[in-house]
Amino acid sequence: MSWGPDAAREREALLSAVAGAVTAAGSAAPVVLIDGPSGAGKSSLADLLVAHWPGDVGARIVRMDDLYPGWDGLDAASAALHTDLLEPLATSGSGRWRRWDWSRQRPAEWNEVAGPAPLVVEGCGTLAAANVRRAHLALWLDADYALRKERALERDGATFASHWDQWQSEFERYLAREKPRANADLVLDVTDWPIASTPRRSSGATVVP
């Protein structure tokens, strides 16, 4: 699926897939995971899905930006997503995640996620095999490399620019080990989709991929 001339129709197809995931979840909390390389538009797609979520119960968003324990924390955050949030949410109806305080470079507060309300998790590392087993819909985003880098650096500025190569190296190791693109239910080429790249900040955090 690509966001080309038929973007409106393709968006409707994606939203239909989300509705199907909600139905498939039954009484459990529907979980949608969005992964892909830096600057592909994961956060913007998550915002789109939440804004158009089917049904009367709105979806919650967890952003992996808030979980990474530093610039070398992709693997740790991906594992924590499974251990602390997705697995207990699926088995007991209640999970949690811990925010990383980027300004102080240390763990911050725990955040509880409980009940059957839908959950969207976006960010690099979400489509590790263990996480996908607890998802009702797994999405992977593709986009042109130059465009992705331009988007990411426009959004996050010099801080990310100085860590781009470090992050890419860790991300490539994750790709080789977990094969996240192959784990996706849908692969979306969003190169031609005009995704906004406005800066995002939460609790004073540095925004990363």
Image (cartoon, rainbow, N blue to C red):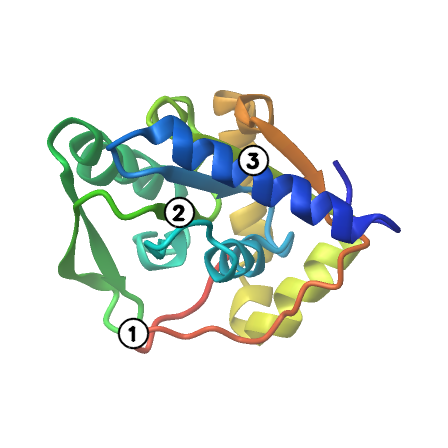
| Residue name at image x 81 percent, y 54 percent | 192
Q: Tell me: residue 79, above or below residue 112.
A: above
Residue 89 in the image, given as x and y percentages of width and height: 19, 36
Q: Amino acid at mark 2?
A: Val
| Residue name at image x 48 percent, y 44 percent | 124
In 3D space, how far apart are the residues under numbered discs 1 and 3 (Cα atoms)?
38 Å
Residue 133 in sight in this render: yes
List the residue tagged with mark 3. Answer: 17
Extreme-right residue of the structure: 5
Earlier sequence position, callout 1 versus callout 2: 1
Residue 61 in sight in this render: no
Q: Secondary structure at mark 3?
A: helix
| Residue name at image x 40 percent, y 36 percent | 22
Q: Tell me: residue 74, above or below residue 192.
A: above
Question: Does residue 194 appear to the left or right of 152 in the view shown?
Answer: right
Q: Nearer the viewer, mark 1 or mark 2?
A: 2
Image quarter for residue 169?
top right
The circle drawn on residue 121 is 2
Q: Amino acid at mark 3?
A: Ala
List the residue tagged with mark 1. Answer: 103
Image quarter for residue 152?
bottom right
Q: Nearer the viewer, mark 3 or mark 2?
A: 3
